[in-house]
Image: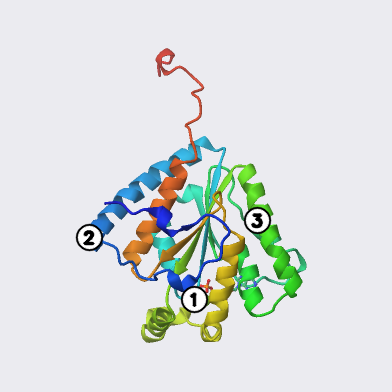
Amino acid sequence: MNINTKDYAISENKLIKIDSFSTKYEGKLEKEKGLKLFNELLIKLQDLQALLYADSSKALLVVLQAMDAAGKDSTIRNVFGPINPQGCKVVSFKGPNSVELLHDFLWRIHQNVPRKGHIGVFNRSHYEDVLIVKVKNLAPEKTIKQRYNHINAFESMLNDEGTRIVKFFLHISKDYQKEQLQERLDIPEKLWKFTMSDIQERARWDEYQHAYETMFEKCSSPKNPWYIVPAERKWFRNLLVAQVLVETLESMDLKYPAAQVDPKQIVIP
Ligand code: ATP
Ligand code: MG
């Protein structure tokens, strides 16, 4: 039994209630079977990445967004770890530096969009500019309102120029976040990840959830869908992300470049 990725996709601009999406996979697929499927998908993903690289006419951009401690890093490690690093780059977007702040919000994003033949993974992204920036009033309301359209136009331009985009929201509950943050405090090797901003942002949980809802409502399309990933079962989270990536790459009509030579005519001396 495979999972139906469409069940998790937001492919059109519509108002959704984030609470109506489960944070835990509760379907029939068992973990053991899920792990087996995941390993099969990883092999497919590796083959498709090699094809994307050889084809070199298109790129894939993967956007990862989530509340703190939802597992973005672990998703990246599990799903993209086995991929050939020659054709895959992860970029983490933190708060903008002083130079970035002197430019429009998409300036630093555009520079990091993957080149053709590559997979680019955004650990946080341009969507922060309508999430944290909205929640903490870091820009005027009017500016933020305009950004949804700018993001859609930007993504649409990337599509036209050969970049496919898939966007994942790792969905967790507030209780689960508490457990994960507590783990950062309890496990010495994880402590370095804890910052006081984790507590500050957590206090604005509801405002963030609402900002996410607005983002889904305004920036979802068949070409650039969001996937709401129930992220509290890590095996399922990894499986869903990997399956969406495989399906997306399979739909990109990738081809090996035409042969430059007729192999039958060539004898290697
Ligand atoms: P981890 O889950 O490991 O904590 P992280 O992605 O949260 O990873 P941090 O260094 O803890 O990394 O946090 C980065 C911070 O930068 C986040 O709070 C994020 O909201 C913020 N940020 C990212 N982009 C922007 C932006 N455009 N404007 C303001 N803040 C931003
Ligand atoms: Mg953090």
Residue beneath disc 3:
152
* Residue 126 image-quadrant placement: bottom right
Label 2 and label 1: CA atoms lie apart by: 28 Å
Label 1 and label 3: CA atoms lie apart by: 25 Å
Q: Residue at x 54, y 50 (%)?
A: 222
Q: Which mark is residue 68?
A: 1
Q: Which mark is residue 24?
A: none
| Callout in the foreground (3, 2) | 3
Q: Of the residues under marks 2 and 1, which one precedes in the sequence?
A: 2
Front residue of this view, candidates 125 and 87: 125
Q: Is residue 146 left or right of residue 15?
A: right
Please indicate, yes or no, whether residue 114 appears anywhere in the rendered image: yes
* Residue 146 image-quadrant placement: bottom right
As helix, strand or loop, the secondary structure at mark 2 comes to helix
Tag 3–tag 2 contact (CB < 8 Å):
no
Residue 182 against residue 73 in the figure, above or below:
below
Q: Is mark 1 within 8 Å of ligand 2?
A: yes
Front residue of this view, candidates 213 and 162: 213
Q: Is residue 228 left or right of residue 187?
A: right
Residue 38 against residue 229 in the figure, above or below:
above
Q: Residue at x 59, y 66 (%)?
A: 215
Label 3 and label 2: CA atoms lie apart by: 39 Å
